[in-house]
C-alpha cells in the first residue's frame, strides 16, 4: 500500500514539476512582449495616419494610437471605422492592440449617460485643477429614501466638489462581501481628510471620499457574473462621499450588508500621490471600455493604483497576455496577499446596520 502511494506521489510530483516548468518557460518567452490583454475596448472614430503612426480619433475628442499592421488599416484611412482592441491596463489605455477593424457610419447622435448607467452611477469629470487642488463634477453626495418605493431604495444628489490632496489624512481599502462570500466581494478606496479637504460647492464638508469602480448597468440591467467575461458592461468609476456609499449599501440594501475596513500603510507622499492618481483615473473618459471579472474590475484596478505608489510592485500577470494573477484580483486572495506584504493592516473595524447610526448620528 505504501509503495503504491509513493508511486502516486511521484507521478503527481512529476506532473506538478512539468506544469511549473511550462509556466516558467511561458513567462520567460512572453515577459519581453508588450501586455495588451488587460482592458477590452470597442470604439468608433476616424482612422488617421500621422507622425505617431495610425491613430483613431473618436467623436468625443479622444485619440488612441493603434498597434496594427499597415496592411490591415490602409483600406480604412480617413474613414469612420469600428475598432475592437485591447489596452495594457485601466491606467494605460493610450495604445490599443487591434483585433478587428471594419468600416462604419459616422454616429448620428452621441450616447447619453442615462442610456449607459444606473441611477446611482455617473462618471466623475474634472472641472479644473490647480496644483494639488481639484474641482470635480458629478460627485455623488446626498442620499435619501425614494418616497415612491415601498421598500428601501436610495435616491441620490450629485454636486461639484473641491478636493485638496494636501489635506488627505488616511487611506482605507474597504470590502463589501457578497454571496457567496468565498468568491464574491466589492472593494473600494476611502480617503479621509483633515478639515477643509473635501467640500462641495454649497460649502458642506465631507470627512471621506470613496472611489468605487463598477460595471455600468443601463436602466433595467442587472449584474450577471456570467456576462462579465463578455463585452457586456461598460466601466464606470464613481466618486462619492463615504456617507453616501455606506448608507446606500448598509441602510438602503434589501439584504444584510457590511463594510470591512483595512488601513493602507503608506507615507504622506504616497497617500497624496495615490489620491491624485485615483482622481485622474476616475475622471478619465472610459466610453467603449469594458468591465471584466478578472482583468478589469473593482479590485484589480485598486491594486493597479497601489502599484503606482509602492516601491515593490505586485505582479499583475502570472503569464503575460495569457494568465492573470488571481492573487491580485480574486477577493479570497487579494487581502491576504496585501496583508502578507504589509501593504494593509488587519481588518480594523466593520460597519453594519447595528452600528451605522454611531458613525452617522443624523440617522
Image (tube, helix red, strand yellow):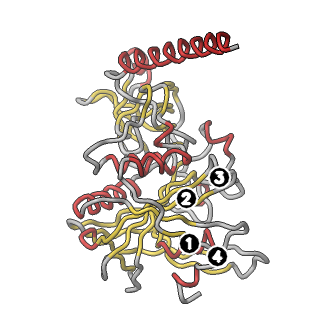
Q: Residue furthest right?
A: 150
- 206 left or right of 296? left
Which numbered mark, 3 or 2, is in the foreground of this view? 3
**Which residue occupies the extreme bottom position in the image?**
362
Look at mark 2 in the image and give the residue it sits on.
113
Q: Quadrant of residue 264?
A: bottom left
Q: Sort mark 2 into few (<14), some (14-19) or many (20+) by Cα contacts within 10 Å.
A: few
Q: Earlier in the sequence, mark 1 or mark 3?
A: 3
Q: Position of residue 331 (x, y in %)?
A: 55, 48
Q: Residue at x 38, y 67 (%)?
A: 191
Instruction: Label 3: state its secondary structure.
Output: loop
For mark 4, does the 10 Å Cα neighbourhood hold few (<14), some (14 to 19), or many (20 or more) residues?
A: some
Residues under labels 3 and 2: Cα distance? Answer: 32 Å
* Badge 1: residue crowd in 10 Å (few <14, some 14–19, many ≥20): some
Q: Say left or right for 261 vs 226.
A: left
Cα–Cα span, label 1 and label 3: 17 Å
- The residue that label 4 is drawn on is 353
- How far is the residue under mark 3 from the one under mark 4? 18 Å
| Tag nearer the camera, 2 or 1 | 1
Question: In the rendered image, which residue does mark 1 sit on?
Answer: 351
| Percent of width and height locating residue 47 | 39, 31
* Quarter assignment of residue 248: bottom right
Cα distance between the residues tagged 2 and 1: 32 Å
- Residue 34 in the image, given as x and y percentages of width and height: 35, 26
- SS for dot 1: strand
Could you tell me which residue is drawn at 67 percent across and 11 percent down? Answer: 4
Relative to residue 219, is residue 53 drawn left or right?
A: left
Residue to which mark 3 is pinned: 181
Split into 4 quadrants, where in the image is the N terminus?
top right
**Mark 3, residues whose alpha carbon is within 10 Å: few (<14), some, or many (≥20)?**
few
Amino acid at each position: 500500500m505504501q509503495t503504491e502511494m509513493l508511486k502516486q506521489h511521484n507521478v503527481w510530483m512529476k506532473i506538478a514539476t512539468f506544469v511549473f516548468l511550462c509556466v516558467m518557460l511561458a513567462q520567460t518567452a512572453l515577459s519581453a512582449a508588450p501586455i495588451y490583454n488587460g482592458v477590452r475596448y470597442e470604439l468608433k472614430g476616424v482612422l488617421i495616419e500621422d507622425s505617431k503612426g495610425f491613430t483613431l480619433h473618436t467623436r468625443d475628442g479622444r485619440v488612441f494610437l493603434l498597434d496594427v499592421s499597415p496592411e490591415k488599416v490602409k483600406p480604412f484611412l480617413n474613414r469612420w471605422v469600428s475598432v475592437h482592441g485591447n489596452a495594457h491596463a485601466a491606467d494605460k489605455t493610450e495604445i490599443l492592440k487591434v483585433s478587428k477593424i471594419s468600416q462604419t457610419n459616422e454616429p448620428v447622435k452621441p450616447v447619453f449617460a442615462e442610456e449607459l448607467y444606473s441611477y446611482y452611477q455617473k462618471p466623475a469629470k474634472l472641472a479644473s485643477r490647480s496644483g494639488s487642488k481639484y474641482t470635480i463634477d458629478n460627485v455623488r453626495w446626498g442620499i435619501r429614501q425614494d418616497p415612491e418605493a415601498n421598500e428601501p431604495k436610495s435616491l441620490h444628489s450629485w454636486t461639484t466638489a473641491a478636493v485638496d490632496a494636501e489635506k488627505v489624512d488616511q487611506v482605507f481599502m474597504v470590502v463589501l462581501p457578497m454571496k457567496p462570500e468565498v468568491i464574491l466581494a466589492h472593494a473600494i478606496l476611502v480617503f479621509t481628510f483633515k478639515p477643509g479637504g473635501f467640500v462641495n460647492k454649497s460649502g458642506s464638508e465631507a470627512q471621506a471620499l470613496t472611489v468605487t469602480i463598477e460595471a455600468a448597468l443601463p436602466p433595467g440591467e442587472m449584474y450577471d457574473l456570467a456576462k462579465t467575461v463578455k463585452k457586456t458592461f461598460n466601466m464606470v468609476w464613481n466618486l462619492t462621499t463615504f456617507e453616501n456609499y455606506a448608507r446606500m449599501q448598509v441602510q438602503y440594501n434589501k439584504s444584510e450588508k457590511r463594510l470591512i475596513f483595512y488601513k493602507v500603510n503608506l507615507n504622506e507622499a504616497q497617500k497624496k500621490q495615490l489620491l491624485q492618481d485615483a482622481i485622474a483615473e476616475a475622471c478619465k473618459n472610459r466610453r467603449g471600455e469594458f468591465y471584466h471579472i478578472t482583468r478589469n474590475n473593482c479590485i484589480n484596478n485598486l491594486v493597479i493604483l497601489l502599484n503606482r505608489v509602492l516601491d515593490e510592485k505586485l505582479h499583475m500577470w502570472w503569464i503575460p497576455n495569457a494568465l492573470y494573477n488571481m492573487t491580485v484580483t480574486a477577493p479570497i486572495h487579494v487581502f491576504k496577499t496585501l496583508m502578507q506584504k504589509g501593504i494593509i493592516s488587519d481588518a480594523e473595524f466593520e460597519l453594519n446596520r447595528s452600528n451605522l447610526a454611531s458613525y452617522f448620528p443624523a440617522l
